[in-house]
Image (tube, helix red, strand yellow):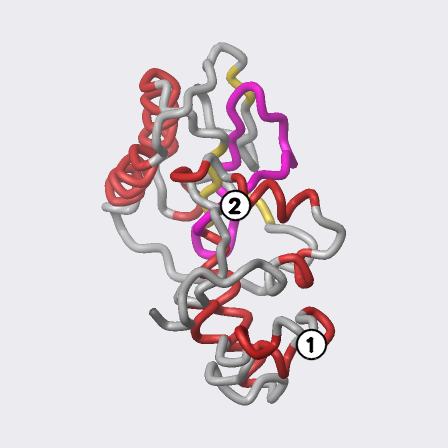
C-alpha cells in the first residue's frame, strides 16, 4: 500500500467488521510511531493552526517512514479487530487518514470513553474563562431548568466533579454491562442535558 500522496485515505473493502476490542490498534500505533520516528527528529515548523481541517503532508516530510505505516495498516486489516479508522497527526500535519470498510470518510462514531477526556478539557477551559467557578459547582445551580423541583432534594449535592468522575449516583446504565441501554435512551431523547440529570438516583453522590 503506497503512502506517497499528500494525504492517505484508503477504504479497504475486504476488511470484515468485528466486535473485538480495539486495544490492538493502540499497540500497533505506538509501535509504528516509535519505528517511523526513530530517525533524525523533525523540528516543528508550523505556520498555521488547524481550524476547519488539518493540512496534509507525506509521512517522510514529517520524519516518518511510510513503509512502516503501510505495514501497520496491513496488520490491522489482517487481525480483523474491528478498527474503523486510523488518523495520525505529526508536527501538526495529517500524514495518515484511513478508513476501513464499511465506514466511508467522515462517518460519525460513538466514541464512548474518549468523551471523558474531551469533556474534562472543556470544563478546564470553562473554569479558566470564568464560566464555572470550580469542579465543586453544583449541577442544580448550573442547569436549574434540567432538574425538577421535586427531584432537587435528592440531587442537590451532585457536583461537576461527580460527573467528571462518574460518581454522580445517577442510574445511567450506559456501559456494555447493560447493553448500552442508557446510552441509547439518551440518544433517543430530545434534550440530553435534560435527560441525564433527570435520571433516577441509585447511590449518594460520591459513593
Main SS category, magenta section: loop
Say which quarter of the image contains residue 199. Answer: bottom right
Which residue shows up at 66% across the image and 71% down it? 147
Which residue range is magenta in the image?
A: 90-113
23 vs 138, nearest the viewer: 138
Foreground: disc 2 or disc 1: 1
Side of 115 relative to 65 (left or right)? right
Say which quarter of the image contains residue 191. Answer: bottom right
Which residue shows up at 57% across the image and 39% down it? 109
119 vs 31, nearest the viewer: 119
Q: Is residue 47 magenta?
A: no
Query: Which residue corresponds to mark 1?
Result: 149
Query: Which residue corresponds to mark 2?
Result: 94
**8 w.r.t. 92: above or below:** above
The image shows residue 166 at horizontal and vertical percentages of: 42, 62
Mark pair 2, 1: CA separation: 49 Å
Decide: few, some or many residues near mark 1? Use Cα within 10 Å; few <14, some 14-19, many ≥20: few
Quarter of the image with the N terminus is top left
The image shows residue 16 at horizontal and vertical percentages of: 46, 14
Amino acid at each position: 500500500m503506497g503512502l506517497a500522496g499528500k494525504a492517505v485515505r484508503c477504504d479497504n473493502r475486504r476488511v470484515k467488521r468485528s466486535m473485538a476490542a480495539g486495544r490492538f490498534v493502540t499497540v500497533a500505533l505506538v509501535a509504528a510511531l516509535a519505528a517511523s520516528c526513530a530517525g533524525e527528529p523533525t523540528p516543528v515548523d508550523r505556520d498555521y493552526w488547524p481550524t476547519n481541517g488539518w493540512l496534509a503532508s507525506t509521512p517522510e516530510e514529517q520524519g516518518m517512514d511510510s513503509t512502516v505505516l503501510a505495514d501497520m495498516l496491513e496488520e490491522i486489516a489482517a487481525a480483523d479487530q474491528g478498527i474503523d479508522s486510523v488518523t495520525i497527526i505529526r508536527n501538526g500535519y495529517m500524514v495518515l487518514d484511513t478508513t476501513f470498510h464499511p465506514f466511508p470518510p467522515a462517518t460519525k462514531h460513538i466514541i464512548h470513553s474518549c468523551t471523558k477526556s474531551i469533556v474534562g478539557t472543556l470544563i478546564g477551559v470553562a473554569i479558566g474563562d470564568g464560566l464555572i467557578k470550580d469542579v465543586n459547582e453544583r449541577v442544580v445551580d448550573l442547569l436549574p431548568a434540567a432538574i425538577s423541583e421535586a427531584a432537587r432534594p435528592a440531587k442537590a449535592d451532585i457536583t461537576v466533579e461527580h460527573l467528571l468522575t462518574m460518581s454522580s449516583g445517577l442510574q445511567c446504565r450506559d456501559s456494555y454491562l447493560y447493553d448500552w441501554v442508557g446510552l441509547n435512551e439518551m440518544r433517543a431523547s430530545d434534550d440530553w442535558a435534560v435527560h441525564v440529570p433527570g435520571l433516577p438516583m441509585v447511590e449518594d453522590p460520591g459513593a
